[in-house]
């Protein structure tokens, strides 16, 4: 099939999509011979003519499942869930969390997997087949993906620094006898009659702040200071791994309720385009319904396990310091990873061994998620511009990695932790929730729940039940609208390490947040202006799929032609 040809029809073509004899009666369940724009050849040809699979489809079912789980289970499961769970009442928080998962997170997770698998394309061009006027959602997803890559990989670089530092007889954050320690350093483990005050700092806290970050050399966002060359080297190694993992394509590899909903959506990750991208490489008849349930279950169980571990550690540390638990975990975010956990590990038997495997685990968790996030951008852009990028994946990935690396430089300065916090709050905050809301509305209300259910039946052999339809049409959009509105109305002051962010930095954050979401209304206006006809005709064209979705009957093709 030539680029630009209709990938959903076979017509007078053989199974490879070329003019010639028709297939015989011996049929096999294969995906339709659509032209794979990512690799520059027909995906059907790769399976019936012996060409290499390349990046056209997952080599094994387990590769896809592990990739999706790897994206969903990330560093946030280890630090964000335990903190929010404790902040909102501990065990009582599990009730709204579970309800939000059942009625919001899991249905949208299922929806995205099904969309990606059926339409077999990335987050930008998929809207031509759903509702063209919402194509700006795809561009917004890519911009959000870039913002996340600017800070998320820096956190992995911190973990790599800790991993390297763990190869020592005595862990460097186990005592107060180091050059970077101050008189406020207080080591209370294994000692009695230790007085802990509001000015006391643990060895792990001073190692993180004064050795890893060297934040004492920064005056805040006004004066972030120079770049830490050690962290720069760590980040370079991380992006090198990311590049060589992605260059060839996928083949292996009240407020309580608001917090509960936000956690489940950020954790499962609908709206980031990753699920669309990964599922687009699936076999057409893959059981994405089962995949959604398995991945969601693993994700939630991982969060629960992390919560049990961190509550135990925090409780013990609070007892040793004779303070409240909230005074131990003062800073939400990566501090739990780089202060609380290391402090607990330093006081275990065999601390060096456990520190090595813990931070190796952190690196693996982070890399899995960054692979998925960047693959979403790569797939979306390459599917949107196949004429330009076909056969040039390696160069495009190299360019994307370079942009991400340069965009991360500000997070490697002495005040880089302040930049990381700002990007974490605004890079993928309300904007990603609003994107998921519009995505749900576009699919359920404009594309139509009956049409979408028919697509799922064509892949899986059964129609989604009434529960899923009600969630897609009403419950999930209502939950998302509630979260977005509540988040906009409730904006607490932004603080990190007792540093309160200035007003101008909050304004910058709002601009970052708006810069991705603004793509959606801009594209709507552009689409309406450039579409010919009257206003009524333009609206009709803009909300109707431009490309006919694949014909499920084309999924049974023959392995050999009639002789």
Image: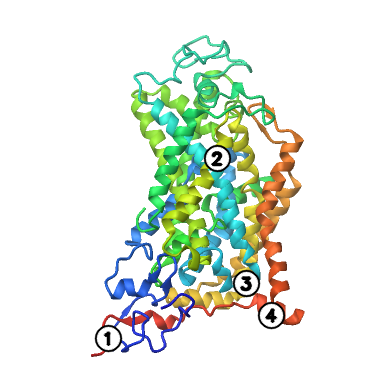
Q: Which of disc 3 and disc 2 is earlier in sequence?
A: 3
Q: Which residue is mark 4?
A: 540
Q: Where's residue 357, x and y in %?
A: 36, 34
Residue at position x 61%, y 39% in the image = 89
State how far apart marks 1 and 3 are (Cα). Answer: 38 Å
Quadrant housing the N terminus:
bottom left
For the question of whether residue 340 can be seen, the reply is: no
Instruction: Please give left or right for residue 16 compared with residue 339 in the image.
Output: left
Residue at position x 46%, y 17% in the image = 189
Instruction: Please give left or right for residue 410 compared with residue 484 in the image.
Output: left
Instruction: Please give left or right for residue 314 compared with residue 28 in the image.
Output: right
- Choose mark 4 or mark 1, whichever is in front: 1
Q: Which residue is mark 1?
A: 561
Quadrant housing the C terminus:
bottom left
For the question of whether residue 16 can be seen, the reply is: yes
Please tell me how crowded label 3 is: few (under 14), some (14-19), or many (20+) other residues with Cα within 10 Å. Answer: many
Mark 1–mark 3 CB contact (< 8 Å): no
State how far apart marks 4 and 3 are (Cα). Answer: 10 Å
Q: Which residue is mark 2?
A: 408
Q: Where's residue 511, x and y in %?
A: 71, 47
- Front residue of 58/65: it is 58
């Amino acid at each position: 099939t030539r680029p630009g040809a209709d990938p959903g029809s076979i017509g007078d073509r053989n199974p490879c999509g070329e003019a010639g004899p028709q297939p015989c009666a011996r049929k096999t369940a294969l995906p339709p011979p659509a032209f794979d724009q990512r690799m520059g050849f027909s995906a059907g040809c790769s399976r019936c003519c012996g060409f290499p699979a390349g990046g056209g489809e997952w080599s094994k079912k387990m590769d896809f499942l592990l990739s999706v789980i790897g994206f969903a289970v990330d560093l946030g499961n280890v630090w964000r869930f335990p903190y929010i769970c404790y902040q909102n009442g501990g065990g009582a928080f599990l009730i709204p969390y579970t309800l939000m998962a059942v009625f919001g997170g899991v249905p949208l997770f299922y929806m995205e997997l099904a969309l990606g698998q059926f339409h077999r394309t990335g987050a930008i061009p998929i809207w031509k087949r759903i509702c063209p006027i919402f194509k700006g959602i795809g561009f917004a997803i890519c911009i959000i993906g870039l913002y996340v890559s600017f800070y998320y990989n820096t956190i992995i670089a911190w973990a790599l620094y800790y991993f390297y530092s763990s190869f020592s007889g005595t862990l460097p954050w186990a005592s107060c006898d180091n050059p970077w320690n101050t008189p406020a350093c207080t080591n209370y483990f294994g000692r009695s009659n230790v007085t802990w005050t509001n000015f006391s700092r643990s060895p792990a806290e001073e190692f993180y702040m004064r050795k890893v970050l060297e934040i004492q050399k920064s005056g805040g966002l006004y004066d972030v200071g120079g770049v830490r060359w050690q962290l720069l080297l760590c980040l370079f190694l991380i992006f090198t791994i990311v590049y060589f993992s992605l260059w060839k394509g996928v083949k292996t590899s009240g407020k309580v309720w608001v917090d509960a909903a936000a956690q489940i959506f950020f954790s499962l990750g609908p709206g980031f385009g990753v699920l669309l991208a990964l599922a687009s490489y699936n076999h057409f008849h893959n059981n994405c319904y089962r995949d959604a349930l398995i991945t969601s279950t693993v994700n939630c169980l991982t969060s629960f396990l992390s919560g049990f571990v961190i509550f135990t550690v925090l409780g013990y540390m609070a007892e040793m310091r004779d303070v409240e638990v909230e005074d131990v975990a003062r800073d939400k975010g990566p501090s739990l990873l780089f202060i609380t956990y290391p402090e607990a590990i330093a006081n275990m038997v065999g601390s060096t061994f456990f520190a090595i495997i813990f931070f190796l685990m952190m690196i693996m968790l982070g890399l899995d998620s960054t692979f998925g996030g960047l693959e979403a951008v790569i797939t979306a852009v390459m599917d949107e511009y196949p004429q330009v990028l076909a056969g040039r994946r390696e160069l495009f990935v190299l360019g994307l990695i370079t942009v991400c690396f340069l965009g991360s430089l500000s997070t490697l300065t002495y005040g880089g932790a302040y930049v990381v916090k700002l990007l974490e709050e605004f890079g993928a905050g309300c904007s990603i929730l609003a994107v998921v809301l519009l995505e749900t509305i576009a699919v359920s209300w404009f594309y139509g729940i009956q049409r979408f259910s028919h697509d799922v039946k064509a892949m899986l052999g059964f129609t989604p039940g009434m529960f899923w339809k009600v969630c897609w049409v009403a419950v999930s959009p209502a939950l998302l609208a509630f979260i977005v509105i509540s988040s906009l109305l409730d904006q607490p002051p932004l603080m990190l390490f007792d540093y309160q962010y200035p007003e101008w930095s909050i304004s910058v954050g709002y601009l970052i947040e708006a810069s991705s979401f603004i793509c959606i209304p801009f594209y709507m206006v552009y689409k309406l202006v450039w579409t010919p006809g009257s206003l009524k005709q333009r609206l009709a064209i803009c909300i109707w799929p431009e490309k006919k979705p694949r014909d499920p009957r084309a999924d049974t093709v023959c392995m050999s032609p009639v002789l």
